[in-house]
Image (spheres, helix red, strand yellow):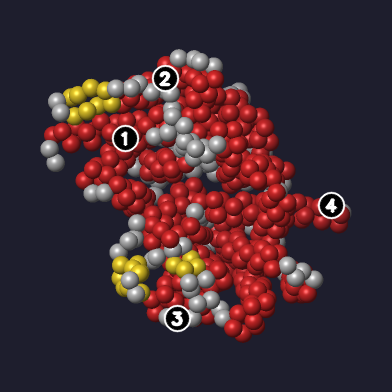
Amino acid sequence: MNLDSILQILISSLTLGGIYAVSAIGIALLWGVMGMLNMAHGTTMAVGAYSTVLAVSALGIPWVLSLPIAIVAGALLGWLLFHFMVRWMLDAATFETNVVVATVGIAIAVKSLLIVLFTANPMRQPFMLEGGFYISKTFVPAQTLVVMIVSLSLMAIVTLVLNRTMMGRAIRATSQNAQAAALMGIPARKVFLHVLMISSAMAAVSGVLVSSVENASPTTGEVALLKVFIICVVAGLGYIPGTILVAFGMALVEVTIQYAIEAKWAYPILVSLALVILVFKPSGLFGVAKVARS
Amino acid sequence: MKKDILIGVVCVALLAALPSLVASKYWLGQIVLLFIWVGVVTQWNLVLGYAGVFSLAQMLVFSIGGYTSAMMSTHLGASAWQGLLSGGIVAMVGGAAIGVATLRLSGSYVALLTLGLASVVQSLITVDTTCISFEGDVCRTFTGGASGLSRLPGFGFTELLGYKGAILGSYYLALALMALGSLFVLLTINSPLGHAFRALRDNPAAATARGINLTKYQILVFSMSAFFTGVFGAFYAGYYRAFGPSSLDLPTLLFLMSALIVGGLGRFWGPLLGVALLMGFDEFVKDFSEYRMIGVGLFTVLCVIAFPEGVAGLLAKLKRRVAL
């Protein structure tokens, strides 16, 4: 393996890692605050991907400006999910299992709706910068830079929001100790709504990025979802900096296997690796032993 | 428990008489499928509902049973009947192994580990292209690869009962297996073993302090429920005379999980009610083609919101109210 292929691997894994990280933060946030495993996260990615397709083709918005549409679409889906579903389920003692099944139902319904509206055929994602440039002999697609810029700035924004704003403090307080937070006058339901909207918006952006590397289709996000879940678990559910680190690590391993061995082995090796880590580190790499809410 | 057995006997008697009323081969086939899924979900209920271990490896265990039977028929020339028993036994070993692997994990970590395990196995089967023997010029791989193993011997009902009677043979065999598996679960949950499972679910710290060995019981519950699950996998292989990696597809697993939650997690009649309700609804919207899955998805959501403790939980609540 020469220097050029190493460069190639690094560039590819930075792109892939950025996409995974954006999606994984959304899941980690939702898990940490609400104990909610959102199986509709992958479908939300697909909704995001189609929202930019629609914005550019139907409304004629320039592609650079279509990303905010995806953010709005994602957040709106989160709002709908909360008001039409999650808030009616919060009181049940079996919330954590029930919400898995309910979001599975949402995922099935929304995916079928996307097939009805846009057919199952893949569509080209317009949120895309054509062309590229060379670093020594390695070709770097310009889209790689776009993906990196979008994912890094999104991560920065979310970190800022969580650390510096009132809403962020409320979210972190609820995630650390829901009961104490409620006693301090933090409205838990409002926090849940905010977290669900932020998480869905991030899923939507991640969907746009995934589909700019592949294509937009109703199944966008389905393959990525399991990998993203695995990233969250290996990092320790709910811990965001660890999640970002593991997302890039996983991407690096995946891309390296694809280059060095064969593409078909990437997935089995990746998941087996994650399983071995979990057996020996039951709460993930960065998880504290007692993360589960009781 | 006596009441449950009584209701069960009446149900089995009614179902046994059903083929004399319903002659349609399509409907009998659908009911056989219903029996298979009720059987699988009932065993899953033991792990997920009573022992409270969030395992998503149920279809993996099912596939271990199915593949054992299919591979024994293909490579060793075993009959489907032999596969039925050995499928159960191999699945039991596999189930015990999964129980060991998940021992130290809790809650959602178990869910994702078992889900990951199933998807690794599926991807490993799909990439299997190495020929281990040849049938004429046709290459035979160990697991059948992406297309699976087909042209299995089956249970021989066609030879025994003729072309028309074959479905009846499968129908009664499936009914018997479902009844047997359910009886096994009913006896288990009402035995000291079942109390230990529930104790570990409700308060692991208190249960272990009382001397209930977590390691022992977790391995026990996994292998117990795995036996019948594997038998159903083997029955599936013998009934359809084919078995492939599509049995590990996520939608099947999610359908069965929805059925379990909609029916009532940790309730004996939950699996039957849930599977019957969801399969019935699916049958009802069959003619709406592309809108069908939208309906199925929304129906599931509605059921979970309306009956947080499942249909079985709702019935129990109604019964309490009537009794007062």
Q: Between B142 and B116, which is closer to the camera in this rendering? A: B142
Which mark's residue is nearer the viewer, 4 or 2? 2
Q: In whole angstroms, how far apart are the C-alphas of marks 1 and 3?
A: 48 Å
**Residue A248 — which label?**
1
**Image marks 4 and 2: residues in contact by CB distance under 8 Å:** no
Residue B237 showing in the rendered view: yes
Hey, what amino acid is under mark 3? Answer: Ala
Q: Are marks 4 and 2 on the same chain?
A: no
Q: Earlier in the sequence, mark 2 or mark 1?
A: 2
Residue at mark 3: chain: B
Q: In whole angstroms, how far apart are the C-alphas of marks 2 and 1?
A: 18 Å
A33 w.r.t. B246: above or below: above
**Residue A259 — which label?**
none
The residue at which mark 3 appears reads as B78
Q: Between A165 and B78, which is closer to the camera in this rendering? A: B78
Which mark's residue is nearer the viewer, 4 or 1? 1
Q: In whole angstroms, how far apart are the C-alphas of marks 3 and 4?
A: 54 Å
Q: Where is residue A66 shown, x and y percent of the image?
A: 47, 18
Q: Classify residue A142 by image quadrant.
A: top left
Q: Are marks 3 and 4 on the same chain?
A: yes
Q: Where is residue A259 shown, x and y percent of the image?
A: 23, 43
Q: Secondary structure at mark 2?
A: helix
Which mark's residue is nearer the viewer, 3 or 4? 3
